[in-house]
Amino acid sequence: MLNRQNWDAFQKDRLSETEIGKFILCEAREDNTTRLFIHQFNSWSSVFTKNGWWDTFTVTNQPCKKGFYLCKIQDFKIDRNEYLNCIVFPNKYLGDTINEDLIGWDYLFYCKKLSKEYTSQHYRSRFNIGNLYNVYKNEFENSGYSNIDSFIFAEFMKDKISIEDISIALEEKYDIEKLAEDINNNIKKYSDKYPLLVKKLPKEDILGYDVYTVRNTVNYLEIKSMDYDRLKLGEEFNMLVRVEAVLQYWDKINKERKLKEKENKKLLRQQKKLLKIN
């Protein structure tokens, strides 16, 4: 059975292989200190580690003023009391306070800049990385960097881009969400050109009222757009034209089916009439 000393020695070897060179969020709780406390980029996780008290003992050779830092892991060592220590360098001062839950931190994790061991991932419904790239596309193309993620991270470390800037860009609504909102809010505007879409668009019962929701409209548009390709109806790129074409296709199929059913019923009545006469 592993005792604590053996476990810490095992952890030292494991973490040294994967986490050295990665960044972590640390807090200095007093001025001119070399003792730091790890935060997990997630306020709930930080609560469970008592804001770093119950996390890996962390030190730096660079005295820090009070506040938060983005630190690079330099080494893992076993101290004289046989406890695991994380040795870091405070690369970027972040201020007296920090919002650990901003989606921008998720982006740095996505770019493989943050330590997996000391980062609790968030689960986001929106992570509009395409919009983030568009925001900094021109600056990146003139920067000399070969990778836009490296460019954005470098600008962030130089205080030219803030984590709030990154978060705002990532939280921008997708084009299809903006389209869905416009349809829901201006349904009459679309009724002439896309009558079947307006007629078929799903509603949701909320507090006794049938209302359009962005989620339902987005799902409906995406499903019908995929049907356009599955049914091989053409090579149209406009989302609404694609959706209306799919609805027209099924509307035609249904009308033909109903007409055939009507003809069959008529034929059946005629046959019954002939049987009675005979």
Image (tube, rainbow, N blue to C red):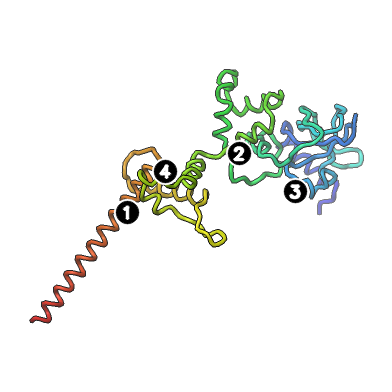
Pair 3/1: label in front: 1
- Which residue has dot 2 on it? 171
Q: State the count of labels.
A: 4
Q: Earlier in the sequence, mark 2 or mark 4?
A: 2
Q: Is residue 199 left or right of residue 127?
A: left
- Residue 194's spot in the image, x, y percent? 37, 46
> Which kind of residue does numbered mark 3 sit on?
Trp
- Which residue has dot 3 on it? 44
Q: Earlier in the sequence, mark 4 or mark 1?
A: 4
- Residue 111's spot in the image, x, y percent? 63, 34
- Residue 174's spot in the image, x, y percent? 53, 39
The quarter of the picture where residue 147 lies is top right
> Which kind of residue does numbered mark 4 sit on?
Lys
In contact (CB < 8 Å): disc 2 and disc 1: no
What residue is drawn where x is 85% and y is 36%?
36
Query: Local crowd at mark 4 within 10 Å, few (<14), some, or many (≥20)?
Result: few
Pair 4/3: label in front: 4
**Disc 4 from disc 3: Cα separation:** 45 Å
Quarter of the image with the C terminus is: bottom left
Q: Secondary structure at mark 3?
A: helix
- Which residue has dot 1 on it? 250
- Which residue has dot 4 on it? 189
Q: Earlier in the sequence, mark 4 or mark 3?
A: 3
Q: Earlier in the sequence, mark 3 or mark 1?
A: 3
- Whether residue 109 is situated above or below residue 5 in the rendered picture: above
**Disc 2 from disc 1: Cα separation:** 36 Å
The quarter of the picture where residue 53 lies is top right
Observer-nearest of 47 and 5: 47
